[in-house]
């Protein structure tokens, strides 16, 4: 099949940020694809091509069908343009299929169950309050909300859960940023990957001597010492959970804060009625759909989806943002509606067996941080014109690199 050009205007790349904030619809051009060619072809940076799925129903069908594989080592997997690809042994269960995926994921599911995570809410609140106290002490000067709050909250929480010393946050935040960058050279990314592997190797070795009462400690005692997994597997768990556990939520916090600063009516509604916060977080997840470069799969057999025949060995890129703006599911999708009745049906956390393991945690963090910001900083506003905010158009996960605010 000859490679096809991306349809004109297809926002495979993150859109200009003005679009995102002014129209509220980062993915306008997906609309035409959804009606005209819901399963289309898209060129990838290396000149190869993959299928692009844009309809909500097709996307759920693909993510819910294990004949579409997540195994990045399979021939035909669309790795091009994806960050962090290529690592095989240490790739983590996000890039594996059953039965191995099921076996490994099961070892950590209970750590992220709603009940377990809800018990962390007071601790998340305490950390958030402390960081807000520190922000308050800097009143008058512009504060970077990403550095002061959005990044530290999820970073502190996941470090605590895993048993990774938060004092090392500069190391893992810097390396994660490199791994997720779409613009750095391959060699630089490879160097970051190997530095992170070295760091986690040493960490796991230390924990093997003295496993703590934390996720990595429990993996070592319950799974590694019983021979279920080895040292490298523990390091792969650490890498996956550490990376997935802080960048994503941090970006959602930054974008959500910015959106609510731009939309004072919604902010006021949430201040007046804090019971709306849970639904508002779902709507913000839908609205921002920060995973813009996947998920991706490769077909393991010929499968018909949305009228297209996808052949074994062909790659599929799933446009999560497009599903979340599909007006057959979400009425008036371009509008942020913090009271939207079905916002929780979004696929911002994916769908199917790989659906986000950390979603309950992300929800608690987002609910606490956003509610606290609204309450404690009612006059919060950007300290620079929106055009000057450095948006993450260069990253696999959308957000802002920095968000200078004042109040
Ligand atoms: C998987 C999004 C926060 C851990 C996923 C997937 C998405 C996603 C779309 C599916 C990937 C696929 O199908 O290939 C998000 C978003 C977050 C977030 C938008 C924040 C707003 C977190 C947090 C953790 C986490 C806080 C903490 C540990 C994971 C893991 C997987 C995953 C381990 C792989 C699950 C599997 O393959 O079975 N996430 N995530 N995520 N996420 Fe998240």
Image (tube, rainbow, N blue to C red):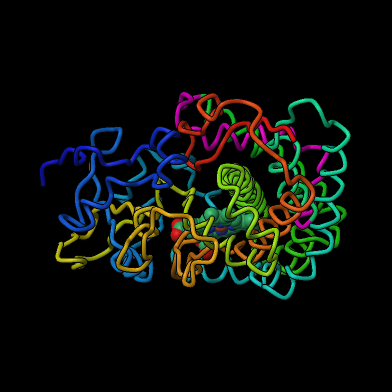
Query: Looking at this view, is 200 or 16 the one in front?
Result: 16
Side of 323 relative to 201 (left or right)? left
Nearest the eye: 74 or 368: 368
From the viewer's side, name the closer residue of 140 and 279.
140
Magenta-drawn segment: 161-187
Residue positioned most to the bottom: 115
Going by the image, does 9 lie left or right of 156? left
Look at the magenta stretch and give its main secondary structure.
helix
Residue 43 visible, this orientation: yes
Residue at the spot 45% in from the left edge and 34% down from the top edge: 17
**For the image shown, how many numbered marks are present on the structure?**
0
Q: Position of residue 251 (x, y in %)?
A: 59, 44
Q: Position of residue 323 (x, y in %)?
A: 35, 59
At 70% from the left and 62% from the top, the residue drawn is: 272
User: x, y percentage for residue 403?
Assistant: 63, 33
Point 64% across, 33% down: residue: 382
Give the camera-side residue of 226 and 73. 73
Classify residue 278 by image quadrant: bottom right
Which residue, as the protein is rendered here, is positioned at the far left?
A: 1
């Amino acid at each position: 099949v000859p490679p096809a050009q991306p349809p004109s205007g297809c926002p495979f790349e993150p859109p200009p940020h003005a679009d995102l904030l002014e129209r509220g619809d980062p993915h306008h051009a997906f609309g035409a694809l959804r009606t005209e060619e819901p399963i289309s072809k898209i060129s990838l940076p290396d000149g190869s091509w993959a299928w692009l799925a844009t309809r909500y129903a097709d996307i759920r069908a693909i993510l819910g069908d294990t004949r579409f594989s997540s195994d990045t080592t399979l021939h035909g997997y669309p790795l091009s343009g994806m960050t962090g690809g290529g690592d095989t042994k240490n790739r983590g269960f996000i890039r594996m299929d059953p039965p191995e995926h099921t076996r490994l994921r099961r070892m950590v599911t209970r750590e992220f169950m709603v009940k377990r995570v809800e018990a962390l809410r007071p601790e998340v609140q305490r950390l958030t309050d402390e960081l807000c106290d520190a922000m308050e002490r800097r009143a008058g000067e512009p504060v970077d909300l990403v550095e002061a709050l959005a990044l530290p909250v999820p970073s502190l929480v996941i470090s605590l859960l895993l048993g990774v010393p938060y004092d090392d946050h500069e190391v893992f935040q810097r390396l994660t940023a490199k791994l997720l960058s779409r613009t750095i050279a391959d060699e630089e990314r490879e160097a970051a990957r190997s530095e992170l592997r070295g760091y986690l190797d040493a960490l796991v070795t230390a924990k093997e001597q003295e496993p703590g009462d934390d996720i990595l400690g429990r993996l070592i005692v319950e799974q590694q010492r019983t021979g279920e997994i080895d040292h490298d597997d523990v390091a792969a768990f650490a890498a996956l959970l550490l990376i997935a556990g802080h960048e994503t939520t941090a970006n959602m916090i930054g974008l959500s804060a910015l959106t609510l600063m731009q939309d004072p009516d919604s902010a006021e509604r949430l201040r007046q009625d804090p019971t709306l916060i849970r639904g508002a977080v779902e709507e913000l997840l839908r609205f921002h759909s920060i995973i813009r470069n996947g998920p991706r799969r490769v077909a393991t057999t010929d499968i018909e989806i949305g009228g297209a025949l996808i052949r074994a060995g062909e790659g599929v890129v799933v446009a999560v943002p497009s599903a979340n703006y599909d007006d057959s599911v979400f009425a008036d999708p371009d509008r942020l509606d913090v009271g939207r009745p079905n916002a929780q049906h979004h696929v911002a956390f994916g769908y199917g067996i790989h659906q986000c393991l950390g979603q309950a945690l992300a929800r608690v963090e987002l609910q606490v941080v956003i509610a606290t910001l609204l309450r404690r900083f009612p006059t919060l506003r950007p300290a620079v014109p929106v055009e000057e905010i450095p948006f993450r158009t260069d990253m696999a996960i959308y957000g802002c690199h920095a968000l200078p605010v004042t109040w």
